[in-house]
């Protein structure tokens, strides 16, 4: 975010090394608007990834081995699946956008990770359904004397 | 017999006995039913009753 801000308002050369060697200088030279849009998409995806990690850690810390299937954790796992699917859809749109830019003659290579997020989202959605069933079975078991 | 005495004889916790007493139990194991009948010297029919659930319209 800092590098992007610097590249837009201070020094254009910062676009050549934004984050971990990512260079968007050709895109910056092509169009500042498209460069801003691409940077915003990258930041949005990184924020969503960070939020996924936060939810995952929250879910893991909420699990008790004594009674592992709790409604709170089930909701968190569902939320992880929805956020992951949403991130996958956004990454897919970003991929299409970067493809369109590449057709326009701009060298813009970035691994958005769309198939991975969609696959992970689908998998975790199924796990969330199974976990919710586990909550029901655990509740019934607790009331079995 | 008090709940404490029954709890000691049957080997159930007071909370579980309370769940049974208040009718919140969803199921009972045969082993638990056997222990209760042995402690109370009765038959399962003496402590179990079928009631039709009235569906609210």
Image: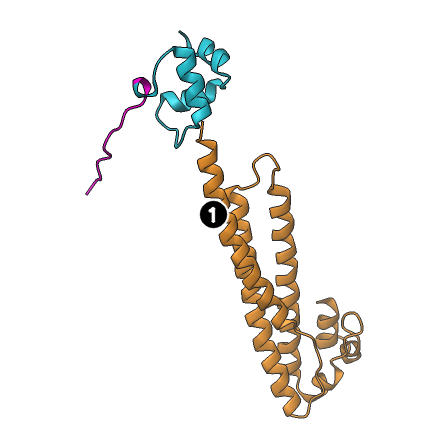
Chain colours: A orange, B cyan
Percent coordinates x, y for residue B21 in the rendering: 37, 20
Percent coordinates x, y for residue A73 in the rendering: 55, 46
Q: Is residue B5 left or right of residue A127?
A: left
Main SS, magenta region, reads: loop
Identified at 51% across, 17% down, the residue is: B11
Identified at 39% across, 23% down, the residue is: B20
Q: Which residue is mark 1?
A: A133
Q: Is residue A75 left or right of residue A45?
A: left
Which residue is at the front of the view, A41 or A118? A118
In the rendered image of this protein, does residue B38 appear above or below residue A139?
above
Percent coordinates x, y for residue A43 in the rendering: 66, 68
Q: Quadrant of residue A121?
A: bottom right
Kind of element beneath mark 1: helix
Chain of the residue where label 1 is placed in the rendered structure:
A
Identified at 39% across, 11% down, the residue is: B40
Q: Quadrant of residue A4?
A: bottom right
Q: Residues within 10 Å of mark 1 (few under 14, many from 20)?
A: some
Percent coordinates x, y for residue B7 in the rendering: 47, 14
> Is residue A73 within the magenta segment?
no
Identified at 70% across, 67% down, the residue is: A1
Q: Magenta residues?
A: B46-57
């Amino acid at each position: 975010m800092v590098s992007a801000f610097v590249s837009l308002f201070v020094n254009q050369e910062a676009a050549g090394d934004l984050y971990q060697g990512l260079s968007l200088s050709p895109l910056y030279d092509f169009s500042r608007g498209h460069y801003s849009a691409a940077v915003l998409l990258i930041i949005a995806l990184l924020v969503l990834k960070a939020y996924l990690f936060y939810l995952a850690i929250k879910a893991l810390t909420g699990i008790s081995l004594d009674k592992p299937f709790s409604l709170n954790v089930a909701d968190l796992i569902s939320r992880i699946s929805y956020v992951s699917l949403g991130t996958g859809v956004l990454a897919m749109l970003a991929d299409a956008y970067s493809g369109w830019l590449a057709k326009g003659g701009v060298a813009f290579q970035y691994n958005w990770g769309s198939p991975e997020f969609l696959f992970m989202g689908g998998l975790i959605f199924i796990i969330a359904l199974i976990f919710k069933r586990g909550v029901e079975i655990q509740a019934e078991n607790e009331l079995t004397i | 017999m008090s709940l404490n005495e029954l709890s000691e004889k049957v080997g159930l916790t007071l909370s579980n006995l309370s769940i049974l007493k208040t009718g919140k139990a969803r199921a009972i194991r045969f082993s638990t039913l056997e222990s209760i009948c042995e402690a109370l010297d009765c038959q399962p029919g003496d402590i179990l009753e079928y009631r039709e659930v009235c569906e609210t319209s």
